[in-house]
Amino acid sequence: ANILEGKLIAEGMRVAIVASRFNEFITNKLLSGALDVLHRHGVADGDVDVAWVPGAFEIPMIAKKLAETKRYDAVICVGAVIRGSTSHYDYVCSEVSKGVAQAGLATGVPVIFSVLTTENIEQAIERAGTKAGNKGADGAMAAIEMANLLQQIH
Ligand SMILES: O=c1[nH]c(NC[C@H](O)[C@H](O)[C@H](O)CO)c([N+](=O)[O-])c(=O)[nH]1
């Protein structure tokens, strides 16, 4: 069978990252994790655009707008929704995840979901560059793989 799978080759890729400012202590770590992976896989610094939004709820709109420009091979969304401080946690989480998925499907551009949805700050810290890794870095890897896979399909 012919196997189609993305290689982790990122030279020449253009990437947008949408980062939410709410819980910036966490989201900044996710952003730097993503930037580190992109740069170490050969993405030029000038080929990465970072858009800041107020909170995770605003991520989908900007992610879709950036994807619609067709200027990027992938859009990575980083944020942190923490139940401890969110009365409407479930609503924010479901709207953000649905919105990010829709942005990708509507545009055909990989829109990567690296938004932490955790019960508490400790869990968020674990996933932002400590013992559970860095979800921003993981998202950058997924972005590289998806962009490369799509190049094989188009
Ligand atoms: O990104 C987040 N936004 C949060 N709220 C703001 C929301 O994303 C919007 O910015 C706001 O509702 C204005 O639209 C959060 N809490 O409410 O706790 C949160 O934990 N994370």
Image (cartoon, rainbow, N blue to C red):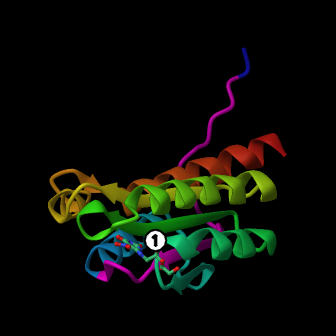
Residue 4, above or below 64: above
Identify residue for label 1. 39
Residue at image point 60% right, 74% down: 16
Please rate how many residues cluster around mark 1, counting C-alpha atoms within 10 Å: few if below 14, some from 14 to 19, many from 20. some
Where residue 133 appears, as percent x and y from the top left, is: 25, 54
Q: Is residue 129 above or below residue 27?
A: above
Task: Say whether residue 50 is left or right of residue 99.
Answer: left
Q: Position of residue 127 (x, y in %)?
A: 26, 57
Tell which of 91 and 13 is nearer to you. 91
Q: Quadrant of residue 86?
A: bottom left
**Residue 84 in the figure: left or right of residue 104:** left
Residue that appears at 48% across and 71% down: 56
* Marker count (numbered): 1
Q: What residue appears at the point 24 percent right and 55 percent down from the top-left corner? A: 119
At label 1, the amino acid type is His
Which residues are drawn in magenta? 3-24
Q: Determine whether the beta carbon of the residue marked 1 sits less than 8 angstroms from the nearest atom of ligand 1.
A: no
Q: Is residue 86 visible?
A: yes
Q: Quadrant of residue 136?
A: bottom left
Q: Is residue 94 above or below residue 58?
A: above
User: Is residue 23 one of those drawn in magenta?
Assistant: yes
Element marked by disc 1: helix
Horizontal side of residue 127 vs 74, given as left or right: left
Question: Is 3 positioned to the left or the right of 39 in the image?
Answer: right
The residue nearer to you, when weighing 19 against 7, is 19
Overall secondary structure of the magenta section:
loop
Name the residue at the right extreme.
154
Q: Quadrant of residue 73?
A: bottom right
Q: Residue furthest top?
A: 1
> What residue is rendered at 43% in x and 73% in y?
35
Residue 57, image x and y in percent? Answer: 52, 71
